[in-house]
Amino acid sequence: MTDNVVEMRDISISFPGVKALDQVDFTLRPGEIHSLLGENGAGKSTLIKALTGVYPIDSGRIAVGGEPRTFAGTADAQDAGIATVYQEVNLCTNLSVGENVMLGNEKRGPFGVDWRTTHKEASRFLGELGLDIDPRSPLSSHSLAVQQLVAISRAVVVDCKVLVLDEPTSSLDRFEVEQLFAVMRALRDRGVAILFVSHFLDQIYEISDRLTVLRNGRLIGEHAIEEISRTELIAAMLGRELAEFESIGRSADRQVDRAGAPVLSASLVGRKGSIEPFDLEVYDGEVVGIAGLLGSGRTELARLIYGADRADQGRVSVRGSTARLTSPRHAVEQRIAFSSEDRREEGIIADLTVAENLVLGVQAKRGWLRRVTKAEQARIVEQYMESLGIRPANPNALIRNLSGGNQQKVLLARWLATDPQLLILDEPTRGIDIGAKAEIQRLIVELASGGLALIFISSELDEVVRLSQRVVVMRDRRKIAELDNESHVDVDDIVALIAKEGAA
Amino acid sequence: MSTIFRHRLVWPIGALLALIVLNTISRPSFLSITVKDGELYGSLIDILRNSAPLMLIALGMALVIATRGIDLSVGAQMAISGAVALTIISGSGSPGSLGTVSTAILTAVVISLLFGLWNGFLVAVLGIQPIIATLVLMLAGRGIALLITGGFITTITSAPYAYISQGYVFGLPFAFIVSVGAIIVISLLVRRTALGVLTESVGINPSASRLAGVRSRGIVWSLYGLSGLLAGIAGILYSSNIMAADANNAGLNIELDAILAVVLGGTSLAGGKFTLAGTVIGVFILQTLTSTITFLGVPPAVTPVFKAAVVIIVCLSQSRRVRAWLGRLRPPQPRIAARTAETERSAA
């Protein structure tokens, strides 16, 4: 075991209300490309930040090169030989390629920096990775992909042992990815251990030697790439739930009356570069589940319907009449509500109280002139705190101090108080504890039985299959299937659909 | 909520009281107020009167800052407003008539409102960074004012106009009444309607507010308009005080004093939560400080050093880190956010 270049044992990190990592083990061997997989909130980025010294760990041990380490900051991690290249390249675009590569390691002559030698050195380092870039050209003259490669070549200059690449391919085209992979292989052959994160399974299978899967802050498994099939991998990432959730019961086979006009009907709605045109219909009292991996277009679909992003084609009608949903305001006026997957950035107003957050939806709908009175506010807040079981039951607490699950309930209450006819929930159960999760699932069933139309997005297929009457399957920013759940859709069917290679 | 509120204002109020005590010790007449013909006079009354322009500007600034913005152009807008009003009065046949003066004031204030809306348009609609968007008018505004006055310092003689800064109502200076009026109107506007909470919501988290259906564009836009309007009134007060439209010096650097007053009052420059009460106290601190310095016979050139010292003290007292540091000497305050950050660090 001592030949592992990185050994992380029993790593736990908690944030207020969330256990981001729960006793996770992770190892990196020299000369391997190791992929880290998991949906949003699985703990990937937290683990990376623990390894690169951004977050201190609550408990556990980290050893680099067999030596126990404590990282108080990123500098400590760099000293230990861990280099990181983020999605957004952090280089100086106004300097030359060579200056960037050699930054901090310039060759010195009798008259200060000897730029000739420095650039020659830079050229040598770039050459070692098979890159033919003029070191004197300004960095800004190159594409983002090349800039990324330059950033990676810095790792060679500082002679790092571990290179962390967090979603380096997300904005690269096919050819650029090949170029990046060539550089990664060259580094691997030099004995560098590479931690690679990508949402593209094809890339994972192409480049990785081993992989680690996380889910909900826990380690699910560590596998050599040959020993896990695509289907097994997707199943591991999306997860099978605990039996206790079954007690909530399947609401999937509940009959939905689709005789009248749908609450919402979208035809060929799409947005270039975001999601290909899709059709969608939602009826009263129906839960339409959206299944797909992260980046499959499920959030984009929701945002287009809500008007959070502007669709550049297609037509939406609400209860049979054409509606222009080009901003959240229009959607709110049509009694459509959308709860974003990003609770912290797009949901809560952290410095306001629970009560203020809760009535914000109603208040926004009314406009600033007609204030929700104290009495009204108290009534709404009391009603929803009670019915949703928001804890602590203190309307004057700042929402930032609540746990994730309770924040989520406040956000749900914010929308329910506006009396919507369609509620779009993007990952409402992510990153919250089991109890709150069960409560939110129960609430979804209740709301739908009460006649509300819902669009329900979740990474957890069991949840989707159990709660929705119809399941829309997404892959590669396209809607690839729509399954009627009356005939009991199986999780494995969906996994198979998602895993299928090539165009559907 | 009320404990946080008190917590926030305790330092600014302390600073203000300290200044008053300091003044009273060095000149016991500081607190004395004399009544002459039913009108009040004294150092305190002067402070109340002279603080009026800054008060108006700072109230507007507090709201703009709450939206994560800043309005650098208020000083220049004061110059424009004064220039407009005095040019109208001096150009008219009867500068002393009430009609002329009201027309002049109304025109000046409306023009200021339009300039404020221009700023708001740049920020809220075009999405230009507030500091740059308002810098445009900060630099161009004084030029515009000079154009209006034809390059001269326009002076006038007009009893009604002089009344604005010199007159008394119910024994109190009219300028002070204007500033109290502004405080009341804006407090009602902000807290009786939902404008305050929606402004805070936009300032704390713009994208979440947008998704919640808040019309953030309209709110931001109109607050810049309000800031311009208040700057316009401040410009009238200032020009009435000197009975001249001085395009180069009217409201010079007042934007910085206003920002200072807002920050001294406990509103964060990062936007979000704001306190009008704190801002009012911040204004009084600055004004008392100015009069203290004058009284102590400190050369005006050194004044900024004194202001800087006070600012540093008050800002330090509001810094979370310094408080945590002081908190170790005293029983700790339960501050959850700061606590978790610290436990995270110490666990490393």
Image: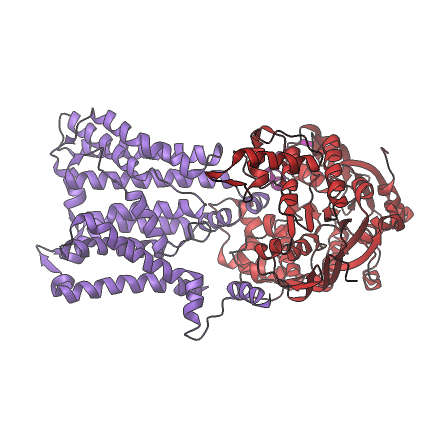
Chain colours: A red, B purple
The answer to which quarter of the image holds residue B109 is top left
Residue positioned 75% across, 45% down in the render: A188
Among all residues in the image, which is located at the extreme right?
A487
Q: Nearer the viewer, residue A144 or A129?
A: A129
The answer to which quarter of the image holds residue A350 is bottom right
Residue A81 shown left or right of residue A184 in the figure = left
State whether residue B347 is above or below residue A369: below
Residue A335 in the magenta stretch? The answer is: yes
Please provide percent x and percent y for residue B80.
Answer: 27, 32
State whether residue B27 is above or below residue B307: below
- The stretch in magenta equals A322-337
Among all residues in the image, which is located at the extreme left?
B37
**Residue B143 visible within the image:** yes
**Residue A433 visible within the image:** no
Residue A384 shown left or right of residue A243 in the figure = left
Please provide percent x and percent y for residue A485.
Answer: 87, 46
State whether residue A485 is above or below residue A123: below
Please provide percent x and percent y for residue A212.
Answer: 78, 54
Please provide percent x and percent y for residue A181.
Answer: 75, 38
Residue positioned 11% across, 63% down in the render: B29
Residue positioned 81% across, 56% down in the render: A222
Residue B64 in the magenta stretch? The answer is: no
Q: Total label count?
A: 0
Residue A411 shown left or right of residue B166 in the figure = right
Query: Which image quarter is the C terminus of chain B in?
Result: bottom right
Q: Nearer the viewer, residue B347 or A359?
A: B347
